[in-house]
Image: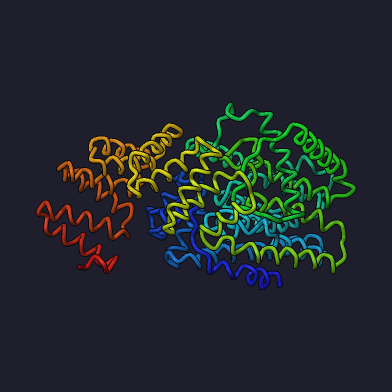
Amino acid sequence: MLLIGTLALYAPVSGLQFTSWDDPEYVTDNPQVRAGLTGHGFLWALTSGHAANWHPVTWLSHMADVQLFGMKPGPHHLTNAVLHAATTVLLFLFFAGATGAVARSAFIAAMFAVHPAHVESVAWIAERKDVLSGFFFALTLLSYRFYVRNPVPARYALVFLLTAIGLMAKPMLVTLPFVLLLLDVWPLKRPHTDWPKRIREKLPLLALSLASSAITFLVQQSGGAVARLESVSFLARLSNAALSYVRYVYELVWPWKLAVVYPYSPPQSLAAFVAAAGLLAATIFAVRNLESRPQPAVGWLWFVGMLVPVIGIVQVGSQTIADRYTYLPFVGLFVAVASLRIPHTVAAALVLACAALTWRQIPVWQDNLSLWGNALAVTTGNYQAHASYASALSDAGRTEEAIRHYRESLRIMPAFPQAHTNLANALARMGRREEALTHYRESLRANPREPLAHNGMASALDDLGRLDEALAHFREAVSIAPDYADGHNNMAAVLVKLNRANEAIEELRRATQLRPDSALFHFNLGQVYRQQGMVAEARRELDAAARLDPQFRR
């Protein structure tokens, strides 16, 4: 029932599209992933810090989807749904096997399956890392239970291996050794006198977590995802963390008005103090009752502990809370709720109510317009949602509406480089290039290493005939982002105008290597070859363009 019910609930994801929110970085504009499973791609997955993360198992999973299904979004979404359903069953098997309480274990697993806060993790292709790490997390719990029943090295090796794979899917699992210590108390009920042994037993797993944490911090810091500690005061981060815990508990109870991005609001001193006091009191109470009332205590500490990596003490990105962060931590709260021994009819009603809200939430992820339109409908002062909704409007050809939303985004957050860049792009398409240049400059003032702003500014300068300036910005764009295929292609066009055909050929070769499935890049390279009298090379590239896109045959 859990398996079939979860798959049926999430069946509509097969009709969802790719979104503009991280899906390009992870799949649609990622040449390594678009190539499918290759030897080069395998090495890249193991060594790349792309998207400010090191998660090679996740990259290989996306590559496998492309290898099997191509670039159709439906099967990519269904892979997420299947992983989510499998994790649901594995969680049930773990809790039912460890406790013998089938009904309560089914409730925990069912709430994990149907809670609407988890729609973001399942319906968003770029969050494959969530459902994949969740799958290996649940496998680890099962293997750990088998190890506890018969603690032999081979079974421990399996726990170690699954933990390592899970961490390579998403480093959120760095708290797994802590969770296993909690499970020793309940439901595995290992002897109280064995605490030193239990802690020593987790040291190899802790070493994995520390290594994953170090790699993640270095990759995210080099990618600019980690805010400098002095830019956000430690007290502010602690205050926000306490409030975030309260918001997540509220979201568990009242999962209404969910959005892909929530606007940041500075914590109020009194609210932060009350939240921190309540959080501390609940945690102390749980620790003191760990032996006498283990299930609710373990559930609460699971929730508090698993959220630590994403609660904002080390600030990653601009978001302070996100639905996807609840994916595994909420299991702890479901465990605590299950300890209340609520009547079966009430439990069933809760599951059905959450399933109804999830069914309602899934279509929000249909496409960019619905995703960002929903974010604007359920939040206020959301500059990211205004900018992203504007991009969706622009893609739909509704440029004037898009410009209004870009301007609203900049009214809320004047130094938002993405909004400046995209507003400039929209203005440039309307022929308002001088006004566009102003916003490109503002974008680069806020973030001098933004390749899209350099590329856009270069294109506007090219249109104005300022070729040398344009070339300088194109070079800056591809030096910042060497894998930026469009930048190489655009720079080649300027080099042709400057009668530097050999350099243009090199740039176009680089573009076609990065995007071998781009008919336009092959066509452009073929045209330059033809102009240089390189007939055989021109025919090869033009034939490649025609194979990829029939419109180039003429």
299 vs 354: above or below: above
Q: Can residue 172 be seen in this view?
A: yes
Residue at coordinates 19% horizontally, 61% vertically from top-left?
540
The answer to which of 328 and 94 lies nearer the viewer is: 328
Residue 144 location, quadrant: bottom right
Q: Can residue 158 be seen in this view?
A: no
Q: In this view, does 549 lie to the left or right of 304?
A: left
Image coordinates for residue 79, horizontal then vertical, percent: 54, 65
Q: How many marks?
A: 0
Image coordinates for residue 235, horizontal then vertical, percent: 69, 29
Q: Which residue lies furthest to the right in this view?
A: 292
Residue at coordinates 29% horizontally, 38% vertically from top-left?
475
Q: Residue furthest top?
A: 230
Q: Which residue lies furthest to the left in this view?
A: 533
Colour scheme of the rendered structure: rainbow
Residue at coordinates 78% horizontally, 64% vertically from top-left?
350
Q: Is residue 194 left or right of residue 487?
A: right
User: Which quarter of the rendered picture does the C terminus lie within?
Assistant: bottom left
Residue 158 location, quadrant: bottom right
Q: In this view, does 546 lie to the left or right of 253?
A: left
Image coordinates for residue 75, horizontal then vertical, percent: 50, 67
Image coordinates for residue 102, horizontal then vertical, percent: 80, 67
Residue at coordinates 69% horizontally, 54% vertically from top-left?
152
User: Which quarter of the rendered picture does the N terminus lie within?
Assistant: bottom right
